[in-house]
Image (cartoon, rainbow, N blue to C red):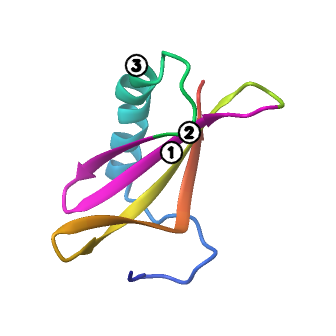
């Protein structure tokens, strides 16, 4: 895995990527997990970058939370890089 920035920082995204990922969450992810499943994973490629969405419901609040990670290209596959993330919530 490789990083373009130090660990501990939020996932670095352009305004376009942030908007695309938000729209993907609002219009695709929410429909895919409407059956009540938890700890669900889905991926989407934006330009040359691949992102994984991990969604689950907070046990205390019941709120849907989605953590987005960037994936690294490893040979012919994508591998989730969990060093940096961006969290969005339903609503």
Report the quarter where the N terminus lies.
bottom left
SS category of the residue bearing label 1: strand
| 83 and 37: which is toward the camera | 37
Q: Can you identify the residue that label 2 sits on?
A: 39
Most common secondary structure along the magenta stretch: strand
Residues at circles 2 and 3 in contact by the CB criterion of under 8 Å: no
Q: Could you tell whether 55 is left or right of 45 in the image?
A: right
The x, y position of residue 77, in whole percent, is: 22, 66
| 84 and 14: which is toward the camera | 84
Residue at the limit of the structure toward the left, as seen here:
76
Give the label, 2 or 1, closer to the camera.
2
The x, y position of residue 55, in whole percent, is: 54, 38
Residues at circles 2 and 1 in contact by the CB criterion of under 8 Å: yes
Circle nearer the N terminus (2, 1): 2
Question: Looking at the image, is 81 positioned above or below residue 21?
Answer: below
The 10 Å Cα crowd at callout 3, few under 14, some 14 to 19, many 20 or more, is few
Circle nearer the N terminus (2, 3): 3
Residue located 53% across and 25% down the image = 37
Separation (CA) of disc 2 from disc 3 = 15 Å
Q: Can you identify the residue that label 3 sits on?
A: 31
Q: Can you identify the residue that label 1 sits on?
A: 54
The x, y position of residue 48, in whole percent, is: 19, 63
Magenta residues? 41-59
Circle nearer the N terminus (1, 3): 3
């Amino acid at each position: 895995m490789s990083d373009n920035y130090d660990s501990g920082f939020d996932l670095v995204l352009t305004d376009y990527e942030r908007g695309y990922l938000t729209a993907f969450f609002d219009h695709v992810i929410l429909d895919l997990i409407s059956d009540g499943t938890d700890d669900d994973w889905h991926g989407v490629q934006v330009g040359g970058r691949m992102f994984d969405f991990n969604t689950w419901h907070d046990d205390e609040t019941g709120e849907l939370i989605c953590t987005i990670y960037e994936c690294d290209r490893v040979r012919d596959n994508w591998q989730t890089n969990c060093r940096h993330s961006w969290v969005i919530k339903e609503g």
